[in-house]
Image (cartoon, helix red, strand yellow):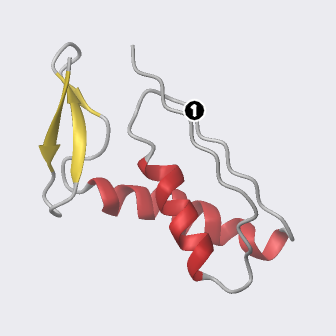
Amino acid sequence: MSTIIETQDGSHTLYSSRFGESYHSRYGAIQESRHVFISAGLYYVIPLRKEIRILEMGFGSGLNAFLSLLEAKKRSAFVVRRHRSLSYCL
């Protein structure tokens, strides 16, 4: 079973009691996602592509894809044509 816990930066993440692991860093879920997916991912790809498509699959919260969408919407160089989200819980 997963529970929601607060991380050190005040954001939240999921914690799996079954595996004894959190889905994001306990130091900061948003901080981690911004570093990995925005700073080292999206910003790296921006100068290389005219169009960017993002697909996120996994068992987490969808935070990485959501932050990428928000960042793309903030930048005038990007037009978000469509956004689809599908969530399935076991």
- Is residue 89 left or right of 4 when viewed as pictured? right
Residue at image mark 1: 57
Image height of 62 relative to 3, above or below: below
Q: Position of residue 43 (x, y in %)?
A: 63, 72
Of 52 and 25, which appears nearest the observer? 52
Q: Residue at x 21, y 50 (%)?
A: 12
Please state if 27 lies on the left or on the right of 45 as rendered.
Answer: left
Compared with residue 78, is residue 45 higher up or lower down, i.e. above or below? above
Q: How many marks?
A: 1
The part of the image, by quadrant, that contains residue 16 is top left
Q: Is residue 20 left or right of residue 48?
A: left
- Coordinates of residue 84 in the picture (x, y in percent): 64, 46
Q: Position of residue 58 (x, y in %)?
A: 51, 29
Residue 79: image quadrant is bottom right
**In this rendering, is residue 80 above or below 53?**
below
Question: Can you name the residue that lies furthest to the bottom here?
Answer: 76
The residue at the far right in this view is: 50
Q: Amino acid at mark 1?
A: Met
Task: From this view, report whether residue 14 is shown above or below residue 46.
Answer: above
- Looking at the rendered image, the quarter that the C terminus falls into is top left
Element carrying mark 1: loop
Give how far across and how far down residue 1 sits, in percent: 20, 17
Q: Residues within 10 Å of mark 1 (few under 14, many from 20)?
A: few
Residue displayed at 24% across by 36% down? 14
- Residue at 56% x, 34% y is 86
* Residue 90 appears left or right of 4: right
